[in-house]
Image (cartoon, rainbow, N blue to C red):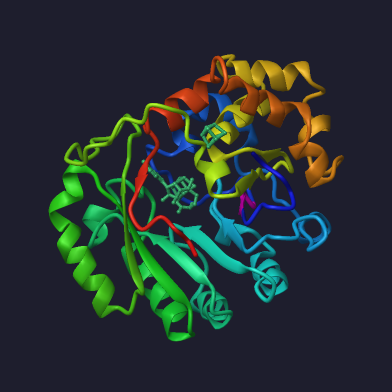
Amino acid sequence: MWDNKTIEWLDIELTSFCNIECPGCFRQVKRKIVNDILNKDNLSLKDLKTWITKEKFPNLKLINFCGSIDEPTLHPEILQIVEHFHSMYDINIATNGSTKTEKFWTKLGSYGISIYFGIDGTDQKSLEKYRIGSSYKKIQTNYRSFIAAGGHATWQYIVFEYNEHLLEEAKKISVEEGFKNFRTIYSHRTGNKESKTKKRDEEQEIVCKYGEQKRIFLSHTGALLPCCFLNSEFLQVYSGGGAETSFTKKYKELDEVLSNNLKYNSPSEVIDGELFKFVVDSWKSKPIERCWHTCKKAKQDVFIHEELK
Ligand SMILES: C[S@@+](CC[C@H](N)C(=O)[O-])C[C@H]1O[C@@H](n2cnc3c(N)ncnc32)[C@H](O)[C@@H]1O
Ligand code: SF4
Ligand code: SF4
């Protein structure tokens, strides 16, 4: 399923830092378990330069800076990281947009990269219902600087019951402001009053979302994992807690950090290793819990215009 020579799309969780508190985010939902690892570590540019090369990922086309717990623009070396990779790969960053300065966003825009701004409202009141701690004014200044400098901006809108009526208004603003795309997410996550209007089709078999997309996930710890969904389970074990699943059990059974981390292994060693094999093999008889829930019943978030390319 995965092969370092065929991987085209790499998701990277650059950091464990974030500046705001979205109630449905893994950071908040699992706060009690993962609190100790939040706002602590960053992947270094030095390591990224060693781990992600044309030799190690010969077919890589896209790097998407988006993880389970990160606000990528808070990484202290983010400009240098983009500077290093943008001539080799397409770059996308997912951000809450409420960070840093106009100067910073102008510089990011000058690289001509793509950014998904998570703006789930059309003013401060509607925005901060979910993006708690975020500033609509600051986001506005930032996306304007980014777009004016040549950046390719996408407005990403998570549809909740409380903001559904603002969807058309948000689309209109996005066009007026020069966004190139508008992307809608109908989320399955619980604990928030999310929209119920979008129906999902039931799939009968496991269709591995990441495998199909020739995509893989790098956690901020250096762990190379099949996908962001399993990163959520991994981070709980890494924090020393969380309910045991067959994936985390297997992870513990193997030599944990040592066997799937790019600090100690090449990408092909991890991908051809036991943990990845265990996940893929499980689909034939008894799929591991996360695969079953996420990719069998199509309970994953429904992304409209999902292709990043
Ligand atoms: C953990 S965030 C990391 C990137 C960045 N901090 C951000 O919020 O865009 C990863 C992705 O999850 C999305 N997200 C946040 N809350 C969500 C929810 N309740 N349902 C679906 N996606 C959500 C974010 O918008 C982002 O695209
Ligand atoms: S901005 Fe992103 S990382 Fe931060 S809390 Fe919200 S969803 Fe999570
Ligand atoms: S949850 Fe399982 S099936 Fe789904 S993308 Fe991840 S590894 Fe693939």
Camera-side residue of 237 and 9:
9
Q: Quadrant of residue 248?
A: top right
Task: Tell me which residue sits at (67%, 42%) in the image.
Answer: 2
> Residue 247 placed where, x, y %?
62, 21
Camera-side residue of 92 and 202:
202
> Residue 160 placed where, x, y %?
23, 44
Q: Quadrant of residue 155?
A: bottom left
Task: Tell me which residue sits at (49%, 41%) in the image.
Answer: 209
Q: Tell me the chief SS of the magenta region.
A: strand
> Residue 273 placed where, x, y %?
78, 32
Q: Is residue 111 above or below residue 261?
A: below
Residue 123 visible in the snapshot: yes
Residue 69 visible in the snapshot: no
Side of 81 relative to 256 (left or right): left
> Residue 8 placed where, x, y %?
63, 57
Q: Is residue 222 above or below residue 239?
A: below
Side of 204 relative to 120 (left or right): right
The stretch of residues the image draws in magenta is 10-14
What is the number of callouts on the image? 0
Q: Is residue 252 above or below residue 120?
A: above
- Return the residue found at the far right: 264
For ligand 3, the image quadrant comes to top right
